[in-house]
């Protein structure tokens, strides 16, 4: 909706940026850190692994100094579970605790609010080997014990917490569950069993945070794509409704409302994938709600009906990062009205405004955009500067979308760019760069890992200085 005036960002808006431990820290085998599923996964040899990454573990003071110079009000980062508990449970690794204490203290001294993600993809390999990880209910107790340790150890300085990053992705990626690629239906079934256990664990973490962290706030961090019906055909509109429930809403409906929404429940029951629900599970979820919703937004997708026929039977699915089509429900098709990144992600700032309004209308909880960014291949100019005008354009347009959503009443805590410095992209290594700060390394050549500010760094610095009045 266009209005004569757009309200300004509030003075307490958390202008932030984000990273994840396995993508930036490096030091994968140093100071007692244990192995995670990300450390042991079969890696594409054409891209780098996570052993060094951006070497944030050894550069954190320099990185925080750059954050302070940029003017960040918040920094979202994750704790590597296996840096604290090398096997996922059991003995504590004090050197890991010391690192995060030092990082948090450095942030507090710089006037930057820490926002901590407890679990960002790197599940302990030790728990996979002990009992199969998230497929066993023992995983719930181990996650909660780890979360409680973090609340007790860091909660005097950390007030904002995120439970599980992109649980919706974990469900559909077997390697992140410690599973090998196998029968697609069996891995989907295992994923939805893990999903139930993660939702129970998240509810218990909400409860523990409220009990152990004074003034603590906690929420999930889902990935949420805007979806559109591709036409005004009623069949496409119905496919869009199904896709919203099955791709976007199902985790948050469990986190916030403590229920399997009707479409999702029937989908699981019809395909023999409904996980066992023990007495008390759903009550626990209903009684322990998050304080806010964190979500990652990068792109939108268009949805078309995908009717069954002799070649496409009910239950036939195709999976890439997420299900791209499923017979009898929907298929994802290219949106001809949008441009895309080099990796095919369709750029849609209006989609972000729409997502914010949908989430606010459905859940009525403040929103924290935990990731939003533009990945690209980059080369410094003759002066050593990365002129990333395309990133500035992307971020500016998406922040305007946030401002417009706020203008019609959507409540926000803040916004985090992805990412602060260049990091290892989960599927594209160091050839896909997201950072406001360049890290001097290549895919397989570490170079000196020095930091340099991109043009977007200065743009974001000025945006924060003006509290978004330039948007």
Image (cartoon, grey):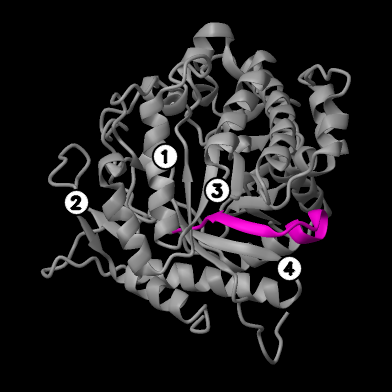
- Give the left or right position of residue 202, taking residue 339 as reference: right
Q: Residues within 10 Å of mark 4 (few under 14, many from 20)?
A: many
- Give the left or right position of residue 94, taking residue 409 as reference: left
Quadrant of the rendering where the N terminus is positioned = bottom right
- Give the left or right position of residue 405, taking residue 397 as reference: right
Q: Which residue is drawn at 29% across and 71% down?
A: 455
Name the front one of labels 1 and 4: 1
Relative vertical location of residue 220 with respect to residue 87 in this rendering, above or below: below
User: Camera-side residue: 310 or 154?
Assistant: 154
C-alpha span from label 3 to label 2: 31 Å
Relative vertical location of residue 105 with respect to residue 122 in this rendering, above or below: below
Q: Which residue is drawn at 26% across and 47% down?
A: 59
Mark 3 or mark 2: name the one nearer the start of the chain. Answer: 3
> Is 358 within the magenta?
no
C-alpha span from label 4 to label 3: 25 Å
- Magenta stretch bounds: 359-373
C-alpha span from label 1 to label 2: 24 Å
Q: Do the residues labelled 3 and 2 touch (CB within 8 Å)?
A: no
Mark 4 or mark 2: name the one nearer the start of the chain. Answer: 4
Mark 1 or mark 4: name the one nearer the start of the chain. Answer: 1
User: Camera-side residue: 204 or 377?
Assistant: 204
Which residue was labeled with disc 3? Answer: 158
Give percent across and percent down for residue 309: 74, 30
Which residue was labeled with disc 1? Answer: 100
Q: Which mark is residue 440?
A: 2
Q: Which mark is residue 410?
A: 4
């Amino acid at each position: 909706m266009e209005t004569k005036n757009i309200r300004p960002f509030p003075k307490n808006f958390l202008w932030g940026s984000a990273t994840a431990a396995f993508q930036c820290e490096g030091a994968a085998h140093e100071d007692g850190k244990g192995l995670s599923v990300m450390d042991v996964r079969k890696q594409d040899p054409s891209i780098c692994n996570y052993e060094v990454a951006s070497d944030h573990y050894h550069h954190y003071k320099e990185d925080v100094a750059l954050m302070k110079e940029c003017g960040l009000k918040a920094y979202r980062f994750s704790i590597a579970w296996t840096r604290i508990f090398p096997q996922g449970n059991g003995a504590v690794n004090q050197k890991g605790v010391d690192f995060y204490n030092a990082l948090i203290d450095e942030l507090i001294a710089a006037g930057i609010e820490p926002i901590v993600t407890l679990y960002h993809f790197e599940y302990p390999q030790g728990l996979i080997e002990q009992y199969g990880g998230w497929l066993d209910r023992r995983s719930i107790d181990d996650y909660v014990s780890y979360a409680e340790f973090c609340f007790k150890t860091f909660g005097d300085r950390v007030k904002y917490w995120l439970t599980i990053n992109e649980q919706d992705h974990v469900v559909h990626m077997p390697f992140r569950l410690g599973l090998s690629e196998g029968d697609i239906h069996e891995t989907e079934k295992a994923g939805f069993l893990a999903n139930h256990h993660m939702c129970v664990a998240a509810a218990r973490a909400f409860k523990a945070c409220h009990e152990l962290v004074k003034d603590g706030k906690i929420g999930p961090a889902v990935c949420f794509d805007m979806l559109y019906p591709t036409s005004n055909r009623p069949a496409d509109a119905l496919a869009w409704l199904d896709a919203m429930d099955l791709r976007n809403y199902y985790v948050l409906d469990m986190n916030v409302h403590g229920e399997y929404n009707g479409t999702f429940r029937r989908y699981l029951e019809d395909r023999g994938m409904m996980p066992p629900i023990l007495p008390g599970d759903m009550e626990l979820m209903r009684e322990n709600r998050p304080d806010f919703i964190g979500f990652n937004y990068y792109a939108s997708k268009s949805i078309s009906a995908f009717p069954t026929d002799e070649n496409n039977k009910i239950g036939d699915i195709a999976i890439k990062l997420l299900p791209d089509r499923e017979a009898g429900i929907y298929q994802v098709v290219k949106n001809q009205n949008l441009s895309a990144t080099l990796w095919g992600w369709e750029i849609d700032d209006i989609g972000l405004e729409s997502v914010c309004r949908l989430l606010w209308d459905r859940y009525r909880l403040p929103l924290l955009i935990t990731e939003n960014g533009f990945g690209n291949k980059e080369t410094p100019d003759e002066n050593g500067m990365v002129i990333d005008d395309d990133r500035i354009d992307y971020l500016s347009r998406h922040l305007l979308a946030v401002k417009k959503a706020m203008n019609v009443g959507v409540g926000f805590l803040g916004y985090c760019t992805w990412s602060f410095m260049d990091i290892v992209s989960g599927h594209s290594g160091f050839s896909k760069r997201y950072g406001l700060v360049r890290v001097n390394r290549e895919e397989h050549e570490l170079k000196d890992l020095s930091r340099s500010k991109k043009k977007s760094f200065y743009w974001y610095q000025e945006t924060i200085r003006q509290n978004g009045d330039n948007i």
